Image: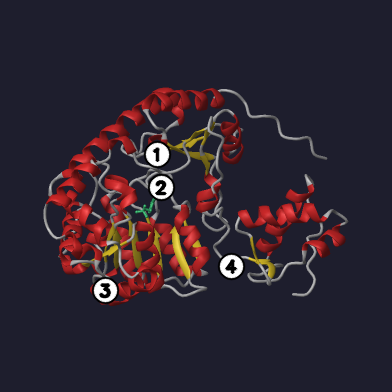
Amino acid sequence: MTKYSPQPLPPGPLYQAIVQALARDIRAGTLKPLDRLPTHRDLADDLGVTVGTVTRAYKLAQRRGLIRGEVGRGSYVAGPGSDVLPQHEITTLPPEVLDLRLNLPPYDRGPDLNQVLERMSRGGDLAELLKYQPSAGMPRHRAAGAAWIRMCGLEVGADEVVICNGAQHAILTVLTALARPGDTVLAEALTYPGVKTLAGILGLRLEPVAMDEEGLIPESLDAVCRRRKARVLYCMPTLHNPTTGTLSEARRREIARLAEFHDLYIIEDDVHRLLPREVAPPVAAFARRRTFYIPGISKTLAGGLRIAYLTAPRKFQEALTRGIAATTWLAPPLMAEIAAIWIEDGTALRTLENKREEAAVRQEMAARILGSHVGRRGTAAYHLWLELPAPWRGSQFAEESTRAGVSVLPAELFTVGHAQAPQAVRVSLTAAPDRAVLNAGLRRLAELLDRPPEPAPFIL
Ligand SMILES: Cc1ncc(COP(=O)(O)O)c(C=O)c1O
C-alpha cells in the first residue's frame, strides 16, 4: 500500500482518535499486517496536527499491539493475533495503588528455600547440576515430573515427560512444534493473555470458541471446526483464567471426542489443576494421543523456579526436545533439582495445602464483601471474575478502580480476536500482600460497585 490516511477521524482527543482509526482500518482489512504506515511528519502534515500528536498516537498504538516500529523500517501494522497489551507492558502503578492485576500465588505460603539449599549444600555432588544436561531434562527430574503429573490424574512414565522453563515456555514449545505462521489456533473466547502474546509473536491467528459459566462449549468447538481449518486447540479446563470455570467430566470427554473427529491437537493448560480438591480427570486422560498436557508447578509450588513438566504424544517427543534445545537449550538443572526434592519429600503437597487454605480464606472474604457480584464457581481459585452491574463497563471500572486505589484487569485484555468482551474484570485475590490489605482493597471495589460510573463525556 502506498499512502495511508486514517480519515475520517472519530471524535475525541486527536491522538486517541488516530489510534481508534488505525484499529478500525485494521479490523476492516484496509490495513493489512506488515503494511507500512506514514512517517510521523507525513501523517502530521496529512492531518494538520503536530508531529508530537502523531508520535503519541503511534506509541499508544504500539502499546496496544496494533502496530510495531523498528529503527530503519519505520512503523508498520502488527501481525495477526497481536491485538493485545503485551504482558510486559503492564504499566507500573504508583506505590499507593493496590495491584490486583496479576495472577500471583500467595507468596507468604511458599516453601522454605533456605532449608532445601542447606540440605543440598550438605549432601551430594552439586557439580552435576552445573553441567549441560539433556534438553528433555535429567532422568531423576523427569521422574519427579511424572510423579507430579500422576498427582494430576494422568498415568505417565518419566520417559514421557520433558522439562520446560515454566508453563509459558511449555506452551511456546508446543506451538512451535504444531503450528506455522498464519495457522489458526482455537482458544476459549476469553483466554490467558500469555497465549495472545505468543500468537502475536509467532504470527498465529487465534479463533474464539464460545464459553458459558462452566467454560468451553463443545457444540461451539464443533461448529468452529466445521467452519475453519484448524489443527490446534489451546484450553484451560480447570479454574479457567480469567473466568474460574471448571469443565465437568462429560464436557472433557466430549472435547476429547471432537478432537479425534476433527483431527485436532489439544494444548491442555492445567496450571490450576491441583487447587480444587475434586475435579474430573484431565482431557488428556480421554485423548492421550492428541493432548499436550501442562500441569505447571508455578501456581502451586514456586513460579520463580521457572520449571514446568510437559507430557505429549510420543511421536512429538523429539520435536518438543528440539524446541526446548532451540529456545533455551534446557531448563536449569539446579531449579529442576529443587522442584524434584520438594515433590519427593512432600514439601510440594504441604505447600499446595497451605496455598489452598489461603485461597479459600480470601475467596470467602471476597464473597462477604462483594456479595452477589461474585459467582460461586471458582472458590478454590486465586482470582475471581467480577461481573459488573449495568451500566459499568470493564475498561471504565478498571480505570476508576485504579483511581480509587485498587487496580484490576478488564475483560478486554482476555478476549480472543473480535469476540465480544463481557462487562467484567479479573481480581487477583492472592496478589495482595496480606489479608488485611486485601480486605481494605475489596471494600473499595464494593463502594465503587455501589455507585454509578462517571458520566460519559458529552459528544455530538
Ligand atoms: C493459565 C496460565 N497458564 C500459564 C501461565 C504461566 O505459568 P508459568 O509461570 O509456569 O510460566 C499462567 C501464569 O499466570 C497462567 O495463568
Residue type at mark 3: give it: Gln
Q: Secondary structure at mark 4?
A: loop
Taking 17 as reference, is 261 left or right? left
The structure residue drawn at horizontal position 81% and vertical position 59%, both measured from the top left corner, is: 7
Residue 459 visible in rendering: yes
Of pointers 1 and 4, the one earlier in the residue sequence: 4
For mark 1, does the 10 Å Cα neighbourhood hold few (<14), some (14 to 19), or many (20 or more) residues?
Answer: many
Q: CA distance from mark 2 to mark 4?
A: 24 Å
How many marks the image carries: the answer is 4
Of pointers 2 and 4, the one earlier in the residue sequence: 4
Name the quadrant of the C terminus.
top right
- Which residue carries the number 2 mark? 241
Residue 328, image x, y percentages: 36, 68
Q: Secondary structure at mark 3?
A: helix
Q: Do labels 3 and 1 touch, CB within 8 Å? A: no
- Which residue carries the number 4 mark? 79
Q: Using the image as rendered, state which of residue 91 and residue 384 is in the foreground.
A: 91
Q: CA distance from mark 2 to mark 1?
A: 8 Å
Q: Is residue 453 above or below residue 227?
A: above
Taking 456 as reference, is 221 left or right? left
Does the closest atom of ligand 1 sit within 8 Å of the Cβ of label 3?
no
Does the closest atom of ligand 1 sit within 8 Å of the Cβ of label 2?
yes
The structure residue drawn at horizontal position 60% and vertical position 31%, both measured from the top left corner, is: 403
Q: CA distance from mark 2 to mark 3?
A: 27 Å
- Which residue carries the number 3 mark? 317
Residue type at mark 2: give it: Asn
Of pointers 4 and 3, the one earlier in the residue sequence: 4
